[in-house]
Image (cartoon, rainbow, N blue to C red):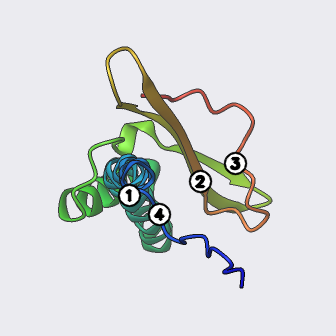
Amino acid sequence: MRTVKQAQQGVTLVGLMVVLAVLGCLGVLALKVVPTYTEYRAIQNAIVNAKAGGGTLLQMQRAFDASATVGYITAINGRDLIITREQGETEISFAYEKKIPLIGPASLLLEYQGTTAKHGMPPADQSSAR
């Protein structure tokens, strides 16, 4: 009688170490990116609140700065906002870059932009980057 040799199934120790290393790198990357995205969402909410408050350009900038203080926004301030009038309505836009150092000379550059405009596209003249 012949016996059929069954192949072992599973992950080797080296394979497990590679998988854990990749997951670790992705985890570290996520821990660096998620706070910048959270800040971006806070900026989006702050410009909506500044627009809802209305008033002059200076009043909207101050309203944004007040929201920025409460929401721990450090990437931009009220002076960095682009406030325009489109079809009789005030729109607030912003654009900025966030550079996240990774390892040595390698870094990750994230470009964030947003607006209160209904069509969702910020004006083309945005050049306020940080």
Alpha carbon of mark 1 to alpha carbon of mark 3: how far?
23 Å
Residue occupying the point 25% across, 63% down: 71
Q: Nearer the viewer, mark 2 or mark 1?
A: 1
| Residue 60 shown left or right of residue 62 in the figure | right
Q: Is tag 4's residue or tag 2's residue first in the polypeptide sequence?
A: 4
Residue on which the image places disc 3? 122
Residue 27 or residue 54, whichever sits in front: 27
Residue on which the image places disc 4? 11
Q: Is tag 1's residue or tag 3's residue first in the polypeptide sequence?
A: 1
Amino acid type shown at disc 3: Pro
Q: Quadrant of the N terminus?
A: bottom right
Q: Nearer the viewer, mark 4 or mark 3?
A: 4
Where disc 3 sits, the SS reads loop
Q: Is 89 placed above or below 97 here?
A: below
| Residue 114 shown left or right of residue 45 in the figure | right
Amino acid type shown at disc 1: Val
Residue occupying the point 68% across, 52% down: 85
Q: Is tag 4's residue or tag 3's residue first in the polypeptide sequence?
A: 4
Residue on which the image places disc 2? 114
Q: Quadrant of the C terminus?
A: top left
Q: Quadrant of residue 106?
A: top left
Task: Judge the density around disc 1: few (<14), some (14-19), many (≥20) Cα neighbours within 10 Å.
Answer: few
Alpha carbon of mark 4 to alpha carbon of mark 3: how far?
49 Å
Residue 34, x across and y down, in percent: 38, 58
Residue on which the image places disc 1? 34
Q: Is tag 2's residue or tag 3's residue first in the polypeptide sequence?
A: 2
Where disc 2 sits, the SS reads strand
Where disc 4 sits, the SS reads loop
Residue 63, x across and y down, in percent: 32, 61
